[in-house]
Amino acid sequence: MLLDAITLFILLCGLFFFMVGVVGLLRFPDVYTRLHATTKCDTLGLGLILFSLILFQGLTGPSIKLAIIIVFIWLSNPTAAHAIAKAAYSVDIPMVKSTYFDQSKEEGISS
């Protein structure tokens, strides 16, 4: 009973992160902020949902596979987001006008 409540709570937290990511995708003004919102959505939302499935299922073969998927997502999703942001920056996709500090331009980082 308590484990089911904890599992449901973690599942709802994962769904919350997905909803916040979708709102960020729709409302944020440029590719960089949208990428930030969707990366958090995927990493935290999917990680929590898969973790709730692991708790619900117990320690079985499929739950170990789900844990491996969580680790893979935690490693690959931020890396892919960084690559997409660097590619967008290298082809001069503009930041939103209210951005007042571009650290890469200040340090002379080239693509």
Image (cartoon, rainbow, N blue to C red):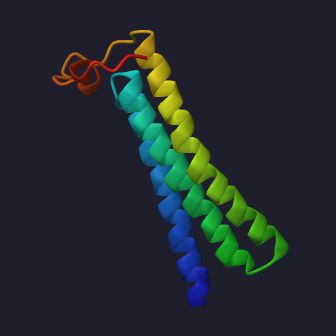
For residue 30, above or below residue 70: above
Quarter of the figure that contains the N terminus = bottom right
Quarter holding residue 8: bottom right
Quarter of the figure that contains the C terminus = top left
- Nearer to the camera, 7 or 34: 34
For residue 76, above or below residue 74: above
x, y percentage for residue 87? 49, 19
Q: Is residue 2 left or right of residue 107?
A: right
x, y percentage for residue 97? 21, 16
Quarter holding residue 90: top left
Residue at 56% x, 35% y: name it. 80
- Nearer to the camera, 38 or 26: 38
State the residue lying farthest toward the right. 61
Give the total of numbered labels: 0
For residue 58, above or below residue 71: below
Q: Is residue 56 left or right of residue 101?
A: right
Residue at 61% x, 82% y: name it. 4
Residue at 57% x, 43% y: name it. 77
x, y percentage for residue 108? 28, 18
State the residue lying farthest toward the bottom. 1
x, y percentage for residue 29? 33, 23
